[in-house]
Image (spheres, helix red, strand yellow):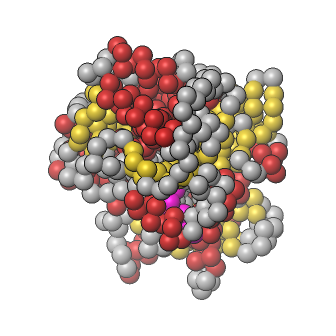
Amino acid sequence: MADLHARLERLAAERPHDTALVHGRRDGSGRAVTFARLVAGCREAARAFERAGVRRGHKAVTMTGDPYHLFTTVHGLLAVGAVPVLVDPGLPRAALRQCLDEVAPEVFVGQPLAHLGRTALGWARGHVRTAVVTGASVPGLRRRLPVPRARQGRTPSPPPAPDDLALIAFTSGSTGIPKGAEYHHSTLVGQAETLARLVGTDGTLFAGFLPVVLLGPLLGHTTVAPAVSHRAPARTPPARLVRPLLEHRTDVVVGSPAVLGLLAEHCARRRLTLDSVDRVISFGAPLRAGLADALHAVLRPDAQVLSAYGATECLPVSAVSTTEARSPGTGTCVGRPLDGVVARILDAGPDGVGEIAVTGGNVSPAYHARPEATAAAKTVTDQGVQHRTGDMGTIDEAGRIWFHGRRSHRVLGTDHVLTTEDVEAAADTVPGVRRSALVGVGEPGRQRAVLCVELTARAPGRGAGRGAVVAAVRELLDRRPEGRHVTAVLVHPGFPTDIRHNSKINRERLADWAARRPRRPR
C-alpha cells in the first residue's frame, strides 16, 4: 500500500461521491461524508494548522470523540509533518499528567471539553504553545489562542520519509502507566496493510472503536462510526449501535467484547437478525465462548465471528474463527499470524509456554521517552524490529498462537506458577458466570491464587443460587491440575476495566479487593 495520504487522494479522485464515513449521532442516525468531502476536510485542517503555526515535527495531542474531526485532525497533522499524539483523556489524573509531560507537546487539538480539562487540570502545562479547537459550526478547525503569524512564501516541506516519526499512540494502561508507542510513517502503512488482510478493502465497515476510524476509509470502506460512549463503551445505548448498522447494511463489524455484547443482547431481546453482516471481529480482549454463541445467534448461519489478537504496539497480529476446531489443551487459541507478521515464543519453559514476540511492518519501533522500556521490549533483527508483547503463550504444530495471559498477571506461588487464561477460560464456561479473573494475593513467590467471578445478569444474586454457581466453579477447578492451586472463589459485583475497551480487567484493583475479603475454608 502506498503512502496513506496518496492513497486517500486517489480514492477521492476515483470515487468522489461514494460515502467514506458515516458520522453517528446520539439518536442513532448518521451524517454521510463522501471521499471528496473527507479529503477536503483534511486539506482544510492542514491549512488551519499551518496558519496556526504548527510545523513539521511538532507533537500535537489530539482529543476528540467526533469521528470526522478525529480523522481530519490526524490526517491534517500528518499532511504538515506534525506528530499526532493519541491518549485517553479518562486516564487517572497522575497517569495522564505523566504521559503528557513525557511527550511535551507543542500543540493541543481537541473539542471544547478537552480544552476545559487542559486548562483546569493543567494538562501539558508549560509545553503547549498552540491550541486549536475542533467542532466549529462548519467542517474544519478553528484557532482560539494567539499564535505567531505564519511566514509568507514558506517553502513546502518535503514529503516524510518512511522512518520519520508519524504518530504516538499511548497504550491503555491496563498493566501500569500507559506507554507512548511510536509509529513511523512506514508503521502506519504496515498497520493499514495488515488490517486490510483482516477486514478486506471494500464494503461497509462498522468501527466500534475510534482507532479503526483512522484507517477504515483508507482501505476503501464506507466506515460507519457510531456514537459510542468512548469513555464508557459498555454504557453506550444499544440503539446508537444497531440503527446505523442496520440502515447502512454493514458487511464487517469491529468492536471490543463490551460493544459486541451490547449488540448481541439488544438484537436477541428484539429478535433482530443482522443479515447483512458477513464477519464480526472482536478486538481488545479474549472473546469468550458465551459471547461468541450470542453473536452467532443474531447472525446468518454462514457469518463468521473472529477473535483478533494484537496490541497498541502491533495491531493486528492474528485472528481465529470461533468455529475453528480446538484441540485439547490450556490457554486460548488466537489463531495464526496474519500475512506479513511473524510470531515467536521466547524464553519458553518445559511446558513450551514463553513470551510471545512479534515482528512485522505493523510493529511500533520504540516507546516515546522510555529508553528502558524500549530496550526491554524491542530488538532489531534481520526481519525488522521484534516486539516482546508481555503476553505468555505457545505456538502449536499448526502455527496457531495460544494465549496464556499477561506475564505480569501470573500468580507466583511457593511451588507453582499460574497463568490467567489456563484458569479463566475454563471457569468462564460455567453457567451463570459472565467472566472471571485470576489474581495473586500477597508477595510474588508466596502468592495465593484467588479467582474473582462476575455473574451474568440472569444469575442468582444472593443466597443458595449464587452459592451453587460458586460451587460449580469450584468443582470444575478441582478437576484441573492448575485449578487445585486456587484457594478461593469470590463473587465480585462488577469488574473494574480499562477505559478504551471496557474489556481488559484491572487485576491490580481486583487483587487489592480480594486481599480485603475474609479468608474462608476452601
Quick check: 305 left or right of 380?
Answer: left
Whether 305 is drawn above or below 520: the answer is above
**Type of secondary structure dominating the magenta stretch:** loop
Magenta span includes 91 = yes
Task: Identify whether 269 is placed above or below 365.
Answer: below
The picture quadrant where one finds residue 123 is bottom right
Whether residue 471 sits left or right of residue 227 in the image: it is right
- Which residue corresponds to the image point at 47% horizontal and 20% vertical from the top-left? 7
The residue under the point 43% across, 20% down is 9
Residue 100 drawn at (x, y percent): 63, 58
**Residue 328 appears in view:** no
**Image location of residue 262, percent across then percent down:** 32, 53
- The residue lying toward the viewer, choosing from 366 and 270, is 366
Q: Residue at x 38, y 81 (%)?
A: 463
Q: Which residues are magenta?
A: 88-93
* Residue found at the far bottom of this picture: 518
Image quarter (top left, top right, bottom left or bottom right) of the C terminus: bottom right
Residue 398 on image: x %, y %? 63, 26
Res. 416 image quadrant:
bottom right
Spot the residue most to the top: 14
Whether residue 490 is situated above or below residue 172 in the rendered picture: below
